[in-house]
Image: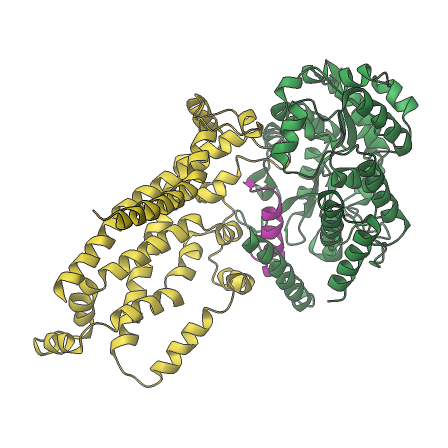
Amino acid sequence: MKFKAYSSALLALCFILVMTACSSNSGPTQGTNGSDGSKGNEKVTLKMWYWNGAISDSTIEAAKAKFPNITLQAEKLPSGDDYLTKLRTTLAGGGTGPDIVAMDAWISSMITYKDKFVNLYDQGAHDIESKYLDWKWKMATDAENKYLIGLPIDVAPVVLYYRTDLFQQAGVPSTPEAIRNEVKTYEDYLSLLKKVNEATGTKTGTIADVFGFLLGQSPEKFFDKDGNYIGDQAAVKKAWDGAVKAFQEGLTFQTSNDTEKNAAINGGKISSFAGASWVVGDLTSAAPDTKGKWGIAYPPGGPGNQGGSFFGALKSTKYPKEAYEVIQFLTSPENLLTAYKEFGNYPSTPEIYDNPEMENKNDFFGGQDLSVVYGEAAKDVIIAPTNPQDDMVANSLIDSLKEVDGVKKDPEQAWKEAQAKIKRQLSR
Amino acid sequence: MNVEILSKKVFFHAVLLLGVVISIFPFYWLVVMATNETSAMFAFPPKLTFGSYFVENFNNVMQNMNFFRALLNTVFVAVVSTTLQLFFNSLTGFTFAKFKFPGSKVLFFILIGTMMIPGQMVLVPQFIIMKNLGLLGSYIALILPSIATAFGIFWIRQYALAIYDDLLEAARIDGCNKFGLYWHVALPVLRPALAFLAITTFMGVWEDYLWPLIVLTDTSKFTLMLALQQLKTVHTADYSMVMTGTLLSTIPLIVFFLIVSRQFIAGIMEGAVKS
């Protein structure tokens, strides 16, 4: 694991070095495998990189059928950091890169290297812009909104997962509508948690979970859009203080590993927590004993987003027009609906949120239609500017929060230490 | 038997037993998880007994990845890499140990020096070289960088230093050429060293992840470690399926280890009797 951390850091460094070295060299583009120089009606080969779960396999088959003149070579690669590592190395080293690439939420960090990607605005992406969630679309554009490097696939809105039965027992709002109307702010949520805790002895997620939840609601995070560090200012401090407050009132589950937390969820010790739409899968397998007792609601204080991907085309492709056509097809609302039905990736096209086919009644949640809440949350997501250093800052702050919980460190002291540590790292 | 000696023995065996338990436990848990449902993995306290879901998990693995294709790819790459590496490393190591030629010391120290460069550092340059050679996406790109390693050469050289010069001289007088010295005299003596090198190389190639990840793109050429990743999606995974796949992928490695380690021990014995 250590090896992996070092290797990613080193890779990132190499990436930057090689990128700067190569930027002047924009010679003839590297060819892709397959048919060369096809003109007219000859078959065009497009190579596509994606990972398991980025898009449905049946959608890929549909694309092959839809474009008979295109041979679509879809390569299903390892997901997560490994995928990013591979893409970075290929961008830095050149070589037989793909024509179409799937990209995750880290797409914003690729804007810096936008000249490696096809500007989808040049291919006519302006025409379909209105179909997609605005905040999601903006994640793939540069600051001037002149350059677009990817079309949105799915989003992962953060909502409130809660135990209907425990909320009822405590006499607090326990239907999605009541929670949305009566538990509007984080303060409302805290007082609800207090009542539930008094009545049932149950808690919410860990201090770090609460911090992440609050931070996701903020229009500002650790860096402003020019890359200046603002993680020591009001927005982040507010999230920090909110998390500390929940802890001090005894409402957070103690810092522990996932196994313990899952066991606590299954054992009915956690009555609610904030989680992204993809939590459903884990929750269902981690807490079989609580089946039917859960519900989801619009999150108090507003939703955040954790994940969701894009499809873009690399500049090295010989067929930007064809690549765009395929991407547009893969990310069309109908095909995103297929992906949602198959494995729960929530679409980024609001026009289909009211489609009857979107209905997603889940027995684990007492038959609640999950799509409704996800849809409401997805529309309201606010995205803060991102920065390659975000993870480092987040980890430092979370480590300190864990000390507040674990060794009862004074929160102000912990905050100062975390900030000092972050600034030391940033000055390197 | 003396009580003191007996209690010492008991103590040492207890320590050894503890070591065995600690090192076997992860593997044991792998088997446990491969025979259970995913929910058992989240259970607390953890489940420690075998379940009855192995066949189901096994079928899931087979459906979600082309296991035997990946296994074949891995065996091919591992066998070719290991064979080439044993040959080139022992040839070079033997030369460094037993032949004097101008610059041999400098060359050797440069070679040792390369061991200090972290592997990740050469990743991008190596990638560019492979690209310029037009080898990206092929098995050659996977095998070529590992056909000789600084550690392997160093390891063999240290071992080969112990070969008696007289032995080589005698062979030379009997009409052996330089390659003959290597083939007929050095190789048999180096067997235990080669067995160790074979095990580490084979395991290294088997488990290598980063380089195949970057070089290979064609899914049908994926090695096991890459193909196993396909069992996982971004946010969630059927962990018992992943564990089953992992278990299946380690079995050939264990078999290989058992075969070669026998060589390893036989080699040690042989050397002991001869000297």
Q: Magenta includes A83?
A: yes
Q: Position of residue A407 (x, y in %)?
A: 72, 46
Indicate the quadrant containing the C terminus of chain B: top left, top right, bottom left or bottom right.
bottom left
Q: Position of residue A348 (x, y in %)?
A: 77, 33
* Region rendered in magenta: A75-97
Query: Residue at point 16% right, 68% down?
Result: B185
Horizontal arrangement in the rendering, residue A268 relative to residue A169 (left or right): left
Identify the hue of chain B.
yellow
Which one is in front, A206 or A248? A248
Which one is in front, A127 or B273? B273
The reply to whether residue A108 is in sight is yes
**Chain that appears green:** A
**Residue A95: which quarter of the image?**
bottom right
Query: Residue at point 25% right, 79% down?
Result: B99
Q: Position of residue A76 (x, y in %)?
A: 55, 39
Horizontal arrangement in the rendering, residue A23 relative to residue A301 (left or right): left
